[in-house]
């Protein structure tokens, strides 16, 4: 029963960490748009905590490069289990238009395991919220 | 009071052990320059004194007049020694070219001669040694805590001298003064004759001078000279008070003074001067300089000066005189002055990153609180004062010994350098944190005392405001220190560091003592403190299954201790479980590296993340506050003495 | 005896539940102020249960110890409040909790935790004396520090201690870490201090600090209720109004720095307390 309560709570209270790997800021703005009264993601208990120690879901926007891949791994490591990673935008998915650049590693999944991919350039706020909701379903599997 | 002849004999023997034996032991340890013998003497004297103090418990109150010591009249010995002492101080005045000391010493010699040869006639006979429960509490503190400090000094000094690389050991001199000090303190609290009291008062002055000057460096001498003149000022005030009292009452009988109220003709000015003397001894503002300067001496000296001896002379004297001051303007002034000192010293402590200075200011601050209580002069306040005296002695000794041990290890006394000390010296760090916790948290004794003090001060607007502000500042500087000691990086497993056995013994006994006494506080209150009120005050609290209660307040000591113990056990269990948890690096914006506290900065360079404590020196810095505080204290002192005129 | 046990139980179980609900309401109201809908009222419980179920990760074990001590101290202070014990003692015990939280944060090398902890100390420094003075005012009026006797007083304290109630308001705002006094940590983490004091507490240990905070909320509202203790309705109205005002202040003000806080709160708090206390003294 406790287990069910906890899973239920996890789904009801996803705390986000938003990390900008090297985005053009297009996707970032869309992420932040979710916090505005128009979308009001706090309705779903979602809080942008800005701190890996407290977060359940890691939203990554932008291309991973050699400089920031360590940071990404560090942040991921600091999150307590269970955790879900959502990659946002073409850049987060595959490197996007920066893919061929000399300093670029590629998509987020080159460095850390990704659970949900949200495409778009930039991804729409609705799509991002959708991605988070799909990510929440993963908590059922991650028990 | 004591009916039994046999009992008197025992009591006289015990008092002999408490006062004279240390003097003899001190001389022995000076003459016999062998480390082993000296250690033995210190240990033996310490345990004998502690044992005698404990044996005194069932025998109080008592009073007697020792007739002769080794065939010579006691009064004559004291008199001769007193003049010898004053001339010695005069000599030091010449040696160190201090005009103030010369003048003060000469002044005291003249007045002493006037008092002894022209005023005092032998017709007023009274008992010269008197011991009630208040005295007993002091004797216990001096003999037990003082002895523990001396014992800890054995390994400490050995280490200290090895470190300094001295060619000739000076330890014989050091222990000579230390043991002498304890004897003088016992003598002081046990004397009923004010002339005796004065003599011992001067002995403690001289002892502190010698101890502070121990290292012989320039600063040491300078600070020692400052201590000497400040305390001589107190001595001078004391002797003037004696002359005044004798002219007024025709006897220098402490008990008679205590039981004569100013209304009944006691000279108020004399009382004010005695308070003044007490303030100099207790290093209250503006005389804080000597206690701060005393840091230059080896740490056991600071521990001794701050906890069980010297500064406690001041509070003992005022507590002793409190019944006589009851209801006077003087008493209110003392309360105000004490409250002011409590606040001001706490503020200065906040601005300090030097661990020993924080301890010094905290001593001054706590003594201020005790004075405030004595000045409030209601039963609750006096109870609080006595409790604070006991607990402050134990815990301050513990903290000083801890800092001394830490200082020998890391060669710094700066709080910032103690960051992450747990990794290096886990047990000492834990003990220090324990000391801090006992200083600021209920259900431990200091907080119990503070609680009583606050409730007693609630009817005095100025005092309660100062105490309220001061105690918040107190929390700030202690909490900051405890947090710094326990900060990362943590060593993997708990492995106590190596220290000499005697050091552990001293630390453990003081730490355990603080804890046990806190639990036993209700018992302490009904068994020791109520009798120590001597019927001058109505016992303020009722004790019921370990709960202290009066008409307007309640402090469930024993239940709280139980709950705290339970909470502690649970927390320890939690720690053991948490030890299995995944250890993650502190948050450094994701830039952390494998090395703790280091992040990857620009150009891939490794940078150490540094955060220092807030010392708020722009507000609470010494340079900024000291002048104003001294000024304020001087105004209050003038009020105190002037109001008594 | 049974009564005592019931009270202790109430303190341990009902109090955090109430605190959590108040927190939920707070979040909804705040959302409404910002033209949002906000989370469900039981959201704080979801958060805490979730945190309790997360993996245990710590920066060091000492921090775990501190989290437990914080929770224990706040719980004890609330239980003592329910047992109608001594006001001053309760203040001391809640201070223990606050101090442990700070010590735990100081044990991390992260500058965010460190600075947050230092600021929290400054917050303690700001509100502690005020709370003491408020209790002193209550004592001067009712002649007792015991809560039982304060509740039994037959006149609302607010009429005699209006300024001290304002002072209590200052202390509450700081204690609840509401703007403009949310220096050490705030409800929203993505700021210059991250989560300040709480940055390095994670998972179950963060949950403990959250529950401890609920206890604190209840204690604080309990203190408010002392000011209109003659009737239940008065008590509820005063508590509700105060908390509502807190939320309004939180929403309309921006964060200030510690210098301003210390200077302003001490100056205002002390002046108001002194004026009010002098009234009581001269009476
Ligand atoms: S996906 Fe498009 S909008 Fe998003 S970061 Fe990349 S380039 Fe910018």
Image (cartoon, rainbow, N blue to C red):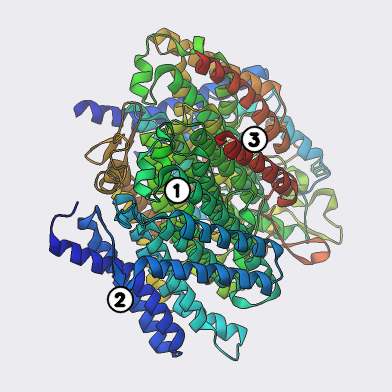
Q: Which residue is mark 1?
A: B246
Could you tell me which secondary element the residue under label 1 belongs to?
helix
B44 or C129: nearer the viewer: B44
Chain to which mark 1 belongs: B
Q: Which residue is mark 3?
A: C188
Q: Residue furthest right?
A: A101
Mark 3 and mark 1: span between their CA atoms? 72 Å
- Tally the numbered discs: 3
B336 or B152: nearer the viewer: B336
Split into 4 quadrants, where in the image is the N terminus of chain A?
A: top left
Q: At 55% across and 45% down in the image, what residue appears?
A: B474
Chain to which mark 3 belongs: C
Asked whether residue B495 appears in the rendered view, the answer is no
Residue B298 x/y as whole percent: 56, 72
Tell me: A26 left or right of C228: right
Residue A125 in which image quadrant: top right
Residue under disc 3 on the same chain as residue under disc 1:
no
Ligand 1 resides in the quarter of the picture at top right
Tell me: C207 left or right of B411: left
Do the numbered discs 2 and 1 sit on residues whose CB atoms are within 8 Å?
no
Asked whether residue B259 appears in the rendered view, the answer is yes
Residue B443 x/y as whole percent: 37, 45
Mark 2 and mark 3: span between their CA atoms? 82 Å
Q: At 66% across and 37% down in the image, what residue appears?
A: C183
**Which mark sits nearer the N-terminus, 2 or 1?**
2
Tell me: B278 left or right of C154: right
Dot 3 surroundings within 10 Å: few (below 14), some, or many (20 or more)? few
């Amino acid at each position: 029963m406790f287990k069910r309560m906890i899973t239920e709570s996890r789904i009801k209270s996803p705390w986000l960490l938003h990390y900008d790997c090297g985005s053009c800021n297009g996707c970032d703005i869309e992420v932040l748009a979710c916090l505005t009264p128009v979308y009001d993601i706090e309705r779903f208990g979602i809080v942008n905590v800005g701190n890996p120690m407290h977060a359940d879901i890691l939203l990554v926007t932008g291309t991973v490069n050699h400089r920031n891949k360590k940071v990404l791994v560090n942040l991921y490591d600091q999150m307590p289990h269970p955790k879900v990673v959502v990659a946002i935008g073409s850049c987060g998915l595959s490197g996007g238009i920066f893919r061929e650049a000399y300093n670029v590693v590629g998509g987020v999944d080159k460095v850390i395991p990704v659970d949900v991919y949200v495409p778009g350039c930039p991804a729409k706020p609705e799509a991002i919220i959708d991605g988070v909701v799909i990510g929440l379903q993963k908590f059922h599997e991650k028990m | 009071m004591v009916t039994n002849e046999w009992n008197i004999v025992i009591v006289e023997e015990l008092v002999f052990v408490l006062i004279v034996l240390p003097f003899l032991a001190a001389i022995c340890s000076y003459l016999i320059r062998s480390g082993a013998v000296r250690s033995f003497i210190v240990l033996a004297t310490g345990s004998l004194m502690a044992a005698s103090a404990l044996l005194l418990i069932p025998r109080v109150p008592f009073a007697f007049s020792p007739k002769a010591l080794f065939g010579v009249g006691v009064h004559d010995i004291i008199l001769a020694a007193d003049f010898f002492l004053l001339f010695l101080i005069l000599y030091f005045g010449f040696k160190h070219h201090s005009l103030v000391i010369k003048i003060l010493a000469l002044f005291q010699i003249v007045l002493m001669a006037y008092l002894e040869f022209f005023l005092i006639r032998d017709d007023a006979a009274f008992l010269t040694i008197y011991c009630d429960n208040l005295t007993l509490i002091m004797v216990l503190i001096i003999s037990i805590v003082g002895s523990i400090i001396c014992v800890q000094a054995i390994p400490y000094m050995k280490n200290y001298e090895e470190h300094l690389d001295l060619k000739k050991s000076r330890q014989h001199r050091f222990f000579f003064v230390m043991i002498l000090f304890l004897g003088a303190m016992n003598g002081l609290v046990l004397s009923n004759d004010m002339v005796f009291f004065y003599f011992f008062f001067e002995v403690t002055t001289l002892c502190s001078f010698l101890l502070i000057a121990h290292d012989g460096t320039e600063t040491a001498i300078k600070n020692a000279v400052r201590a000497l003149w400040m305390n001589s000022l107190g001595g001078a005030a004391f002797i003037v008070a004696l002359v005044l009292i004798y002219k007024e009452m025709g006897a220098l009988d402490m008990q008679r003074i205590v039981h004569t109220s100013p209304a009944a003709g006691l000279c108020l000015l004399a009382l004010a001067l005695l308070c003044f003397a007490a303030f100099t001894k207790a290093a209250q503002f503006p005389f804080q300089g000597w206690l701060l300067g005393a840091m230059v001496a080896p740490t056991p000296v600071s521990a001794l000066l701050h906890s069980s001896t010297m500064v406690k002379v001041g509070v003992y004297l005022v507590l002793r005189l409190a019944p006589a001051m009851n209801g006077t303007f003087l008493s209110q002034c003392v309360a105000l002055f004490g409250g002011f000192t409590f606040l001001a010293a706490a503020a200065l402590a906040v601005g300090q990153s030097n661990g020993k200075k924080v301890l010094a200011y905290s001593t001054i601050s706590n003594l201020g609180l005790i004075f405030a209580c004595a000045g409030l002069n209601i039963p609750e306040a006096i109870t609080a004062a006595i409790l604070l005296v006991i607990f402050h002695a134990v815990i301050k000794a513990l903290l000083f010994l801890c800092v001394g041990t830490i200082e020998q290890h890391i060669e710094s006394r700066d709080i910032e350098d103690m960051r992450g000390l747990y990794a290096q010296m886990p047990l000492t760090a834990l003990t220090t944190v324990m000391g801090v916790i006992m200083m600021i948290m209920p259900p431990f004794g200091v907080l119990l005392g503070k609680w009583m003090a606050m409730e007693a001060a609630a009817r005095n607007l100025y005092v309660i405001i100062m105490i309220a502000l001061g105690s918040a500042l107190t929390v700030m500087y202690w909490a900051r220190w405890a947090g710094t000691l326990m900060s990362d990086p943590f060593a993997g497993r708990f492995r106590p560091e190596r220290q000499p056995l005697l050091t552990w013994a001293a630390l453990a006994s003081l730490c355990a003592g603080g804890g046990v006494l806190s639990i036993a506080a209700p018992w302490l209150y009904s068994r020791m403190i109520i009798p120590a009120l001597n019927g001058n005050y109505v016992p303020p609290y009722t004790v019921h299954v370990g709960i202290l209660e009066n008409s307007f307040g309640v402090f469930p000591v024993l239940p709280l201790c139980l709950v705290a113990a339970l909470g502690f056990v649970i927390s320890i269990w939690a720690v053991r479980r948490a030890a299995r948890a995944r250890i993650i690096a502190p948050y450094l914006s994701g830039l952390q590296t494998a090395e703790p506290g280091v992040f990857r900065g620009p150009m891939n360079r490794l940078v150490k993340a540094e955060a220092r404590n807030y010392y708020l020196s722009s507000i609470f810095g010494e340079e900024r506050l000291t002048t104003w505080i001294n000024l304020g204290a001087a105004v209050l002192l003038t009020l105190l003495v002037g109001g008594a005129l | 005896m049974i009564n005592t046990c019931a009270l202790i139980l109430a303190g341990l179980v009902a109090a955090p539940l109430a605190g959590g609900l108040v927190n939920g309401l707070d979040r909804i109201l705040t959302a409404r102020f910002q033209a949002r809908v906000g989370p469900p009222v039981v959201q704080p419980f979801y958060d805490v249960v979730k945190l309790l179920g997360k993996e245990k990760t710590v920066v060091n074990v000492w921090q775990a110890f501190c989290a437990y001590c914080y929770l224990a101290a706040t719980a004890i202070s609330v239980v003592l409040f329910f047992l109608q014990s001594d006001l001053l003692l309760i203040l001391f015990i809640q201070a223990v909790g606050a101090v442990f939280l700070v010590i735990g944060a100081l044990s991390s090398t992260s500058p965010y935790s460190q600075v947050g902890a230092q600021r929290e100390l400054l917050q303690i420094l700001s509100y502690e004396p005020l709370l003491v003075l408020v209790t002193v005012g209550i004592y001067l009026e009712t002649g007792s520090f015991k809560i039982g006797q304060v509740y039994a007083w037959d006149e609302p304290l607010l009429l005699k201690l209006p300024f001290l109630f304002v002072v209590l308001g200052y202390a509450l705002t700081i204690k609840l870490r509401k703007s403009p006094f949310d220096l050490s940590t705030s409800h929203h983490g993505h700021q210059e201090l991250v989560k300040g004091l709480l940055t390095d507490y994670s998972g179950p240990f963060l949950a403990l600090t959250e529950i401890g905070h609920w206890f604190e909320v209840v204690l604080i509202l309990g203190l408010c209720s002392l000011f209109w203790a003659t009737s239940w309705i008065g008590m509820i109205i005063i508590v509700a109004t105060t908390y509502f005002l807190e939320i309004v202040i939180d929403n309309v003000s921006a964060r200030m720095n510690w210098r301003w806080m210390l200077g302003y709160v001490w100056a205002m708090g002390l002046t108001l307390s002194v004026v009010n206390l002098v009234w009581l003294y001269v009476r």
